[in-house]
Amino acid sequence: MHMKTLTSTLLASTLLAGSAAWAQTTLTIESWRNDDLTVWQQTIIPAFEKAHPDITVVFAPSAPTEYNAALNSKLDAGSAGDLITCRPFDASLALFQKGKLADLSSMAEMANFSDVAKAAWQTDDAKHTFCMPMASVIHGFIYNKDAFDKLGLTPPKTMDEFYADLDKIKKDGTFTPLAMGTHDQWEAATMGYENIGPNYWKGEEGRKAIIAGTAKLTDPQFVEPFTQLAKWGPYMGDGFQAQTYPDSQNLFTLGRAAIYPAGSWEISGFEKQAAFKMAAFPAPVPKAGDPCYISDQPDHALGLNAASKNKDAAMTFLKWVGSEDFAAIYGNALPGFFPLIDKPVKIADPLANEMLSWRQTCKSTMRYTYQILSRGTPNLENALWATSANVINGTQTPQAAAAEMQKDLATWYKPQQ
Amino acid sequence: MADKRPVRWHIGVFLAPAVAIYTAVMIFPLFATLNLSLYTTVHQVSQFVGLGNFRKLLGDPNWSGQFWNALGNNFWFFVVNMAVQNPIGVALAALLSSPRLRGAAIYRTAIFIPTILSFVIVGFVWKLILSPLWGIAPDMLAAVGLKSLFAPWLGDAHYALTVMALISVWQFIGIPMMLIYAALLTIPDEVIEAAEMDGITGMRQFWKIKLPLILPSIGIISILTFVGNFNAFDLIYVTQGALAGPNFSTDLLGTFLYRTFFGFQLQLGDPNMGATIATAMFGIILVGVCIYLFGIQTRLRRYQF
């Protein structure tokens, strides 16, 4: 009798668990955006689950520096989540070629995105798209508006005005003119060289010329940004060679620096910490009246794990990610990550809106090292980190840095040989 | 006469668990890595290339430049550790074993504590101490009027590697100290008393009596330092990042291996070349350990009391 009760209880519980699992699908999202965990949990996922009560979404991020290695291991072991946040370009392309990411080219929502927005998650011939574009980041300079008002400065439009402002800030002595260090190297490349560079190499025109082999990295338009960087050191404060990225962020948000060479992803963090007014200006142009170009870098997208057991639910989620609704929720929940969708999206945050407005006045381009050119050995992006930091540190001349970049690229890239 | 011994099954039975576990977690992965270094991947297909990867690592300037740079840096890292950590460790142990020293236990604990801290904490703490913005190093130097000596060491290609090696010394000084301290305690009092009867005291006693008796321990410490330093990775990774800046001046074989195997930023991981570097590291450590075992350890004189 006793035994019988136990058996039936077990049986009942098994059935219950089984039917619950059948009704409720759980989707897991792999991501490196661990900073955004609360935004996903409190804003994005509830918005989706409200419309789709039968799907539970779990956002499971890992540390940005470990993401690629961890994701590759999980995909190989078959334990990765259903939806994969895609890095731009080669890292995701390699996953697609290995059959780890599903082909999403046929999704109707892909029509909501321009070719430039999709380029980061396509095969080289643009025939297959494997991730739904989510957001881009825009580069420029964020400045301390209170400091500018106090010193009577106006945001610079040209490089000459930029240095004139820096000189005035330095002379006054209250603020460190530029909040940037070279210890971690990548800021020198990403917020330095690739931030001001597009104005010299004319954005997409110069980037595509390098890929096509019709321009060289030793041409003046690619050496000049290095020459500009070489002047930055004296404005960066004592010991900038050992100043790390978090050091620079703190220096600026504590109100001790005037100008921060920035990516738009800083906006939400800065707005939480800084007690002063902030505004932004795009990379100054070489001469007054020159056309301006901004680095509008595709940053992340969402792909489908080809081995997912919940493909239907995952596709439902992806369709939502490709919609205008999602773009509005995402762009406002994470100011500084700008929706890539081809439709106007209203961003409430003024600083984010200011940076987004540059898309109207300047032409968008992306970091030139990202597409195709960082596929070989030596790796061009790694080389750019080292050379940009060297140039600011004064341990390498702009010409030598450019020559090294060209030599590295030419060793393996056929169109440059 | 039945002089045939019974088969001693119990030996095998008792050894089996250890052998099985060691094979699964050490020997098998080791050979798998060696094997991986003999292949290359072309269009997702693995191809046998024999020693081709090693030829690439040592012969292709794109690889060999980084390899020799990392090996040279590793060698300097080891030299600084040997030259600073071990003499100071021996000196500290000698001081601690002095019967006249008060509070030896406190010193011993304090000096040993960094060894049990994680690399992440050590790297973070030292980055803060040496920070030109908020570090205490510039303020402390300024307090004694030596502010001009301060430099952003971790960002200067001339100093960064040496500073990293000294941080490693700070962290691991407790190991040689403890081992030598233990060795000094095992020296019988009779030997010391006999030396005193012969009039050998103080520093002479240390050089003539104690040092020869602890030489085998110093040998062991040297080889542990060698293996530890040529496997070093964590401290550089947490302090200087995977690109081991500035300009690769702190790149060790470990960080070079990490970047190659797992990839970094836009660089995609290459398990085959990564395994090749791992195998080269294994070879270097193996040769070093063999030189010690057959060249040095067999010549060390041991004393029986």
Image: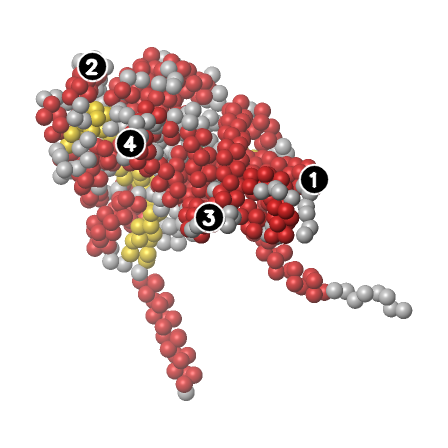
User: Same chain for marks 2 and 4?
Assistant: no
How far apart marks 3 and 2 lie (CA) works out to: 67 Å
How far apart marks 1 and 4 lie (CA) works out to: 51 Å
Residue at screen point 42% across, 32% down: B163
Q: Residues within 10 Å of mark 3 (few under 14, many from 20)?
A: few
The reply to whether residue B248 is in sight is: no
Q: How crowded is mark 1: few (under 14 residues within 10 Å), some or many (20 or more)?
A: few
Q: How crowded is mark 4: few (under 14 residues within 10 Å), some or many (20 or more)?
A: few
Instruction: Residue A160: give its label.
Output: 2
**Residue A159 location, quadrant:** top left
Secondary structure beneath dot 4 equals helix
Q: Mark 1 points at which residue?
A: B299
Check the image and report above or below for A353 versus B117: above
Q: Nearer the N terminus, badge 4 or badge 3?
A: 3
How far apart marks 2 and 4 lie (CA) works out to: 40 Å
Residue at screen point 29% across, 29% down: B142
Image spot of residue B58 (x, y percent): 58, 27
Q: Name the residue under label 4.
A: B143
Question: Split into 4 quadrants, where in the image is the N terminus of chain A?
Answer: bottom left
How far apart marks 1 and 3 lie (CA) works out to: 35 Å
Q: Which circle, 1 or 2, is nearer the viewer?
A: 1
User: Same chain for marks 1 and 3?
Assistant: yes
How far apart marks 4 and 3 lie (CA) works out to: 31 Å
Q: Mark 3 points at which residue?
A: B101
Residue at screen point 55% across, 41% down: B202
| Badge 4 amino acid | Ala
Chain letter of the residue carrying label 3: B
Check the image and name the residue furthest to the bottom: A1
| Badge 3 amino acid | Leu
Chain letter of the residue carrying label 4: B
Image spot of residue A191 (x, y percent): 28, 27
